[in-house]
Image: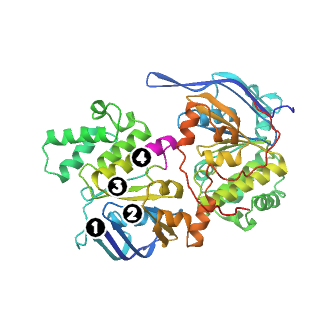
């Protein structure tokens, strides 16, 4: 056993006022070094609240109880250095008036002892790794000059620039079309494998999560209702809610909802 | 074969952006029969929402013709256009953006009844209650504000508003894409029930090929404003022929369950 990267014990998050983020209750969860863990849930499940709590990004209105241990140490992980975070909306997480290259070098220089030249070369290398077309030009591009998928690649490059041990992707592919989504998921999978990062993949899409996660945790209304290996959760779900989610999935093999008709073709 | 309800031919729309011209609808022709669901699918930027908006006349085409219920829809003006618009309704992805979020449910449903003079002031509360019941909501919701109800309830209200004017065609632009999966199935069932009962046709714009395959009769796959492939929804998605069709199908996440649950 390589040990836990993150140990969450009896974690509860609540809000003083009725807030837009749902609360969480009594969560026990370990994230192992290098594992890919998916957090699945619908709106109001608390899945994003959990991701923000692990990254220390909860708003000050939140009351947090319980413990989150990082590598068994009581000190908190540092955002950017120990944990990389990729959000759904890359345009909102990137600075619109800063060149893409500088956004990545800033992360690298903040957390690593690098000269400007070393940081720039690292940024270029990262843009290659996230497979941005023409990385030399992209270094000097601004976010609005890139497509949505390219912006998310830049956000991923910035998230992993300081070599974090945990990458959190919170609905990171939900705003992308299906083809770009599949590319980004493949990229994330490759990057975490190459760098030995653990991945916390937060998603509403259980089929997408099943394609890349080792384990799946199912959240509902602030509680974790099921946790198991991907195979176990998909093939032999224990909780009725997990079964409901699986049954509600409309995949390419779903029974048609409509009767075949005599409608001709165009 | 019966007259098509909607017949679109040679529809062209170009957008100019920073010196380059993007053709979002490149001589698109399509038709929809009464009671039929035609899906428009494709990657982002393929033109599916633009085509839907052109048909709704939310944007004007550069060229082309749209015949709706046997009339040249693009030539209609004034009261004739308003009257025909009642028959062509729309439901978008985000009802809070499409409708006034601070309005009450009753107000949202009162508008079409009043604007199209479908019911007198005294009749309207009863009609609103009936519309709410028709979409599976309690008439007690009438006094609530849109931002106070759940996302699924809001989308039911948007559907109630769309059917208030007894349309023959509803454009559904990613109308179930933002819903939780447990709610999505119920909304799709509601739409199918309305289609069966009222013979409403749908133009179903969606990026989700699984839902398209289950819900639509026919599909048009778009790429760069052109039709890449079209036909029976299940036939096309089960065996795509075009390059983009193959790429779209390959990108759909697969959930390989060994024990298929009974969906009954």
The mark nearer the N terminus, 4 or 3, is 3
Q: Which mark is residue A85?
A: 3
Tell me which label, 4 or 2, sits earlier in the chain: 2
Q: Position of residue B135 (x, y in %)?
A: 75, 58
Q: Residues within 10 Å of mark 4 (few under 14, many from 20)?
A: few
Tell whether label 2 touches label 1 (CB within 8 Å): no
Q: Main secondary structure of the magenta part?
A: helix
Read off the magenta span: A174-185
Circle 2: element type: helix
Q: Is residue B174 visible?
A: no
Give left or right: position of B51 versus B73: left
Front disc: 4 or 2? 4
**Any part of residue A231 in sight:** yes
Cβ atoms at labels 3 and 2 below 8 Å apart: yes
Q: Chain of mark 3?
A: A
Q: Does label 4 or label 1 sit earlier along the sequence?
A: 1
The nearer-to-camera label among 4 and 1 is: 1
Q: Earlier in the sequence, mark 1 or mark 2?
A: 1
Q: Where's residue A21, x and y in %? A: 46, 65
Tell me residue B164's x, y (percent).
78, 50
């Amino acid at each position: 056993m390589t040990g836990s990267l993150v140990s969450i014990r009896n974690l509860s998050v609540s809000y003083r006022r009725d807030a837009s983020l749902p609360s969480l209750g009594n969560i026990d969860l370990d994230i192992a070094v290098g594992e890919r863990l998916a957090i699945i849930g619908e709106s109001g499940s608390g899945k994003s609240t959990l991701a923000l709590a692990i990254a220390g990004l909860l708003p000050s209105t939140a009351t947090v109880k319980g413990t989150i241990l990082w590598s068994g140490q009581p000190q908190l992980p540092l955002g950017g250095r120990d944990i990389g975070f990729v959000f759904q909306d890359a345009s909102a997480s990137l600075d619109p008036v800063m060149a893409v290259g500088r956004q990545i070098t800033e992360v690298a220089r903040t957390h690593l002892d690098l000269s400007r030249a070393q940081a720039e070369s690292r940024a270029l290398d990262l843009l290659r790794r996230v497979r941005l077309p023409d990385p030399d030009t992209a270094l000097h591009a601004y976010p609005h000059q890139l497509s949505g998928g390219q912006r998310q690649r830049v956000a991923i490059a910035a998230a992993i620039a300081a070599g974090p041990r945990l990458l959190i992707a919170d609905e990171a592919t939900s705003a992308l079309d299906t083809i770009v989504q599949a590319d980004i998921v493949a990229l994330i999978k490759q990057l975490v494998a190459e760098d030995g990062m653990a991945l916390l993949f937060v998603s509403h899409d259980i089929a997408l999560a099943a394609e890349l996660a080792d384990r799946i945790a199912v959240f509902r209304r602030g509680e974790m209702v099921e946790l198991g290996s991907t195979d176990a959760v998909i093939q032999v779900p224990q909780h009725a809610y997990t079964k409901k989610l699986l049954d509600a999935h409309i995949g390419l093999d779903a029974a048609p909802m409509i009767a075949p008709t005599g409608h001709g073709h165009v | 074969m019966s007259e098509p309800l909607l017949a679109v031919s040679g529809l062209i729309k170009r957008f100019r952006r920073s010196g380059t011209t993007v053709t979002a609808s490149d001589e698109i022709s399509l038709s929809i029969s009464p009671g039929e669901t035609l899906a428009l699918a494709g990657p982002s930027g393929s033109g599916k929402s633009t085509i839907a908006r052109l048909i709704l006349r939310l944007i004007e085409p550069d060229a082309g013709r749209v015949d709706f219920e046997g009339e040249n829809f693009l030539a209609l003006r004034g009261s004739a256009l308003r009257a025909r618009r009642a028959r062509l309704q729309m439901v978008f992805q985000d009802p809070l953006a499409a409708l006034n979020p601070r309005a009450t449910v009753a107000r949202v449903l009162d508008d079409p009844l009043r604007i199209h003079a479908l019911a007198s002031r005294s009749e309207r509360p009863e009609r609103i209650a009936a519309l709410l019941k028709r979409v599976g909501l309690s008439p007690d919701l009438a006094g609530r504000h849109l931002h106070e109800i759940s996302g699924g309830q809001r989308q039911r209200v948007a559907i109630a508003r769309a059917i208030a004017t007894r349309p023959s065609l509803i454009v559904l632009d990613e109308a179930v894409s933002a819903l939780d999966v447990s709610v999505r199935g119920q909304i799709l069932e509601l739409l199918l029930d309305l289609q069966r009962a009222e013979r409403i046709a749908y133009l179903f714009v969606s990026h989700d090929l699984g839902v398209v395959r289950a819900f639509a009769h026919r599909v048009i796959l778009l790429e760069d404003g052109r039709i890449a492939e079209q036909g029976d929804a299940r036939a096309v998605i089960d065996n795509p022929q075009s390059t983009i069709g193959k790429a779209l199908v390959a990108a759909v996440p697969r959930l390989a369950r060994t024990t298929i649950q009974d969906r009954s």
